[in-house]
Image: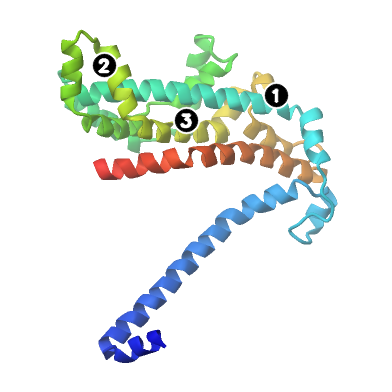
């Protein structure tokens, strides 16, 4: 009754605005809902498909398995060495995260806190590199360089390659560092602290939110990387990552009869990144919103 009276008391222009606002809200939630469906459906279908038989997957049917087959995962780990490939992916992701955090935070500290000849030219050129991508053209010379350094027989070389130039991360972190008062650096310097101690005890604690964002992006990049990992593990199959192993199932001799194993492998690759995001979700949002406020 109160809503009816409120509507009755509105002027025609107010009623029109209210109708437009109501329609806008409906369209907004329809759009958000449809995006959620399109985003989540492949993930849910893959996870549920990993518990089906191959015949059930190829013939279609309901989204839920008729009979839950956990032996798909047992087969993937026991017969296809997915445990080893998972360990390789975890190692690669951790190394990439560590290298990314070290290089980007140190470089960002110098960009934000130090003045040196040619700084503007260097930072402008570095910023320009964010918009230039040579793609797979650089894989061959990069592989030759790492091979000459003896880094193609372990995960360190691939992790260094995936770490990259860190241009975007450096400029994000440097924006945070600029909002840390320089007086803190000066006070620590007067007390006898050196550059590294100032960086470690003052700067790092103050920029933890953005470091969490960088770590999450680095983990995602390393975990999902396929082309570079495929090229750099061709000569050493023992270093094959999980994404490469799952993709290679498609080209195996029994690919037509192993869709259930491929979905199990894809689920094994999906679950860790989902778990990492669930645990790092708050840190991720905090870092982005803090960056938006600090601008």
Nearer to us: label 1 or label 3: 1
What secondary structure is found at the residue carrying circle 1? helix
Relative vertical location of residue 109 with respect to residue 72 in this rendering, above or below: above
Mark 2 / mark 1, whichever is N-terminal? 1
The residue lying toward the viewer, choosing from 174 and 245, is: 174
- How far is mark 1 from mark 3, CA to CA? 30 Å
Q: Is residue 129 visible?
A: no
In this view of the protein, which residue sits in the foreground, 270 or 123?
270
The residue nearer to you, when weighing 97 against 1, is: 1
Left or right: where does residue 80 sit relative to residue 161? Answer: right
Tell me the residue that label 1 is attached to: 84
* Colour scheme of the picture: rainbow
Marks 3 and 2: which is nearer the front?
A: 2
Q: Which mark is residue 198?
A: 2
What residue lies at 47% left-to-right and 30% top-to-bottom? 137
Look at the numbered disc 3 and give the secondary structure of its residue. Answer: helix
């Amino acid at each position: 009754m109160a809503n009816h009276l409120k509507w009755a008391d509105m002027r025609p222009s107010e009623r029109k605005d209210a109708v437009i606002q109501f329609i806008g809200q409906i369209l907004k939630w329809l759009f958000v809902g449809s995006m959620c469906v399109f985003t989540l459906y492949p993930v849910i279908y893959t996870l549920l498909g990993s518990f089906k038989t191959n015949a059930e997957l190829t013939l279609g049917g309901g989204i839920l398995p008729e009979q839950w087959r956990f032996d798909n995962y047992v087969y993937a780990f026991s017969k296809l060495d997915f445990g080893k490939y998972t360990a390789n992916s975890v190692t690669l992701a951790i190394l990439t995260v560590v290298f990314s955090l070290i290089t980007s935070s140190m470089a960002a500290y110098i960009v934000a806190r130090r003045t040196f000849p040619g700084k503007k030219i260097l930072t402008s050129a570095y910023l320009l590199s964010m918009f230039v991508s040579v793609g797979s053209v650089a894989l061959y010379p990069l592989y030759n360089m790492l091979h000459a350094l003896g880094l193609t027989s372990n995960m360190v070389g691939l992790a260094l390659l995936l770490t990259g130039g860190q241009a975007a991360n450096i400029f994000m972190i440097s924006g945070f560092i600029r909002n840390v008062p320089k007086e803190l650096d000066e006070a620590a310097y007067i007390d006898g602290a050196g550059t590294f101690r100032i960086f470690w005890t003052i700067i790092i604690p103050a920029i933890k939110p953005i470091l969490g964002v960088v770590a999450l992006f680095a983990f995602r990049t390393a975990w999902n990387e396929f082309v570079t990992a495929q090229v750099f593990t061709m000569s050493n199959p023992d270093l094959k990552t999980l994404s490469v192993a799952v993709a290679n199932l498609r080209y195996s001799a029994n690919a037509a009869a192993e869709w259930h194993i491929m979905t199990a492998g894809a689920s094994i690759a999906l679950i860790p990144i989902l778990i990492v995001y669930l645990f790092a979700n708050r840190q991720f949002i905090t870092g982005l919103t803090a960056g938006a406020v600090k601008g």
